[in-house]
Image: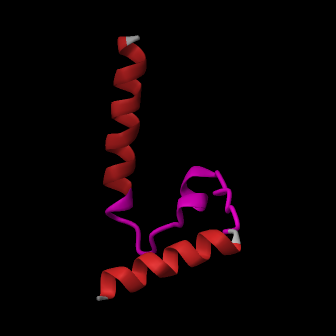
Amino acid sequence: MLAGAAKGRSWLAWHTAVLGRVEKMPTFAEFTGVRPKIKKQTPAEMRSVFAAMREAAH
């Protein structure tokens, strides 16, 4: 188990160092190879978000 944790920390350290040196930052999908799943909002969810935004503005 410790070997796995150490491997994870070394992966993180290496990628953190490399990302600081690249000219163009890759997108999350390019970096991880995982495409995010986008869920479309329902009309009711959109109305709820707009109502919250309207409430916050006043």
Q: Nearer the viewer, residue 44 or 3?
A: 44
Q: Residue at x 45, y 69 (%)?
A: 25
Q: Residue at x 54, y 56 (%)?
A: 31
Q: Is residue 58 magenta?
A: no
Asked if residue 49 lies left or right of residue 54, the reply is: right
Residue 43 x, y percent position in the rendering = 69, 75
Residue 35 x, y percent position in the rendering = 67, 56
| Image quadrant where residue 4 sits | top left
Prevailing SS of the magenta stretch: loop
Task: Please state, as top left, top right, bottom left or bottom right, where the C terminus lies in the image.
Answer: bottom left
Asked if residue 50 lies left or right of residue 30, the reply is: left
Task: Please state, as top left, top right, bottom left or bottom right, where the N terminus lies in the image.
Answer: top left
Q: Residue furthest top?
A: 1
Q: Nearer the viewer, residue 41 or 44?
A: 44
Instruction: Please tell me whether residue 54 is drawn above or below residue 5 in the rendered image.
Output: below
Q: Nearer the viewer, residue 38 or 48?
A: 48
Residue 21 x, y percent position in the rendering = 34, 64
Residue 37 x, y percent position in the rendering = 68, 56
Instruction: Please tell me whether residue 41 is drawn above or below residue 56 in the rendered image.
Output: above
What is the magenta range? Answer: 19-41
Q: Residue at x 32, y 87 (%)?
A: 57
Q: Residue at x 31, y 42 (%)?
A: 13
Instruction: Please tell me whether residue 14 is drawn above or below residue 52 in the rendered image.
Output: above
Q: Residue furthest bottom?
A: 58
